[in-house]
Amino acid sequence: MKSLLTNKYLWLLFIIFALNIPLEMIEHQVEERSMQRDTAKTSVARSWTGAQKVLGPLLVIPYEQKSNVRIALGDGTFKTEERWHKVLMPVAAESQSSRVNIRTQTLKKGIYPVPVYTSLQDVNASFNLESVKAFFREESVRRVEKAYLSFGVEDVRGILGKPKLSVNQEPTEVEPGSNLTFFPSGVNATVEDKLLTGKLIEVVFSLELKGMEALEFIPLGKSNFIEVNSDWPHPNFIGTFLPTEREINTQGYSAQWQTGIFATDIVNVLERCMRSTCENGLIASQFGVRHIQAVDIYLQTLRSVKYGILTIVVTFAIFLLYELVTRKASIHPVAYALTGFSLAIFFLLLLALSEHLTFIWAYWSAALSCTLLIGYYVRHQTQSVGEGAGIFVVLNLFFLVLYFIIGAEDYALLSGSFLLFVLLATIMFVTRKVDWYRLSPT
């Protein structure tokens, strides 16, 4: 008899290991659907725009600098020649403030929703020219071309209409291209020479910009203030600097950033940018916000599948405890296998339904469908309505606990570990008086 009992346990172990196959197939299906969602985002980005990054404003003054070059002659002697070479002087704003209002909407590619936005950005910047005028008094430098203001935009397809710019309260025309080698996309505007003779240049710039998911800023001022207001209720703040102030509610969010020259070292970064590469320096200065979905259905479903074997083991343990404690019926391994497959189907139903319903409705629709099926099956296997109803209730309580575990991103490990401990403690308590040597299957 012990041999028969051992054989049944071996069959159950075999069934549990075999059920890993459909669970892994479902896990791969979740990952595939997630990749299709990402493909849909890429498709929308091609026709709308992608994530946006905004840089500037920056005042650039081209000039030539004189240097003495020693030239070797054919007879072994040298001569010195005076040569002029072109240099670009970056002038960072003394202060810069930006106020950004973001209106969001959701586009669909097939069944996949993709959040996009339209932002209205108002930028004010002030440039101090005292040090610039002092520099051009030197005899070794001379002005050769007009200065210009540069504004960088990651994806210029997102620019709606024509940006508006005024310099010292005078409307100024903007042209395509930023004229910056390290951030070429954007717009620029010529600054007349007469404006460089004063103490300050005051710049007011308005831009309406489309984008998808993320909006980042690279302010180039010595002192920067940026305020963003949006109707999207689920922001994820990204980049080197977090907001100094924020407010988030169901109606949207408001966030403010403040940065300064001591945090960004922007003057030295810009000088390096003009001479060579400056990607690392710019990355150290950028920040922004990403509009995320409140519930990533594929991440939640994948977390659920990770608990698939645990769900099956718990259900089998309930069946075994029923057999050991009540001695009313013996459940055949085939019944265990069918129950295990029905639990695996739960995760496939969850994936399919969550693409069309909210996650909570998808979860409980799948859970109730599977637990009703298992309860109905157990009722006929045990010839007892009470036993079937009991299994239905217990499994739904387990799915309730599992729902909270997969939703607790930061406490999932703690919650799962505690659940395993409680289950083990329950099994040990119920079987504390069982004489395992005298057990025999019926």
Image: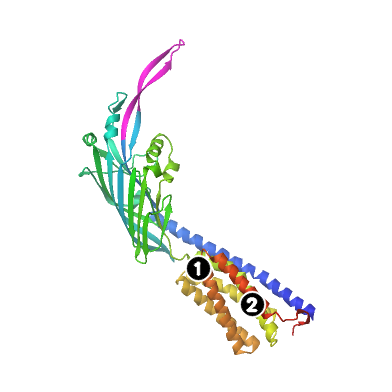
**Which amino acid is tagged 1?**
Gly
The residue to which callout 2 is attached is 426
Residue at (40% x, 34% y) in the render: 275
Give the percent coordinates (x, y) of residue 77: 44, 11
With 362 as the anchor, is 308 left or right in this view? Answer: right
Q: Main secondary structure of the magenta part?
A: strand
**Which amino acid is tagged 2?**
Thr
Residue at disc 1, secondary structure: helix
Decide which of tag 2 and tag 1 comes sooner along the chain: 1
Instruction: Single out the residue that lies furthest toward the left.
Output: 170
Residue at (75% x, 79% y) in the render: 436
Residue at (37% x, 17% y) in the render: 81
Say whether residue 152 is visible.
no
With 140 as the anchor, is 51 left or right in this view? Answer: right
The residue to which callout 1 is attached is 407
Mark 1 Cα within 10 Å, few/some/many (few <14, many 20+)?
some
**Residue 47 location, quadrant:** bottom left
The residue range painted magenta reads 61-85
Which residue is nearer to you in this view: 16 or 131?
Answer: 131
Residue at (60% x, 88% y) in the render: 386
Q: CA distance from mark 2 to mark 1?
A: 24 Å
Give the percent coordinates (x, y) of residue 223: 33, 45
Question: Of tags 2 and 1, which is closer to the observer?
Answer: 2
Q: Quadrant of the C terminus?
A: bottom right
Please, which colouring scheme is shown?
Answer: rainbow
| Vertical relation: 357 (above or below) 260 | below
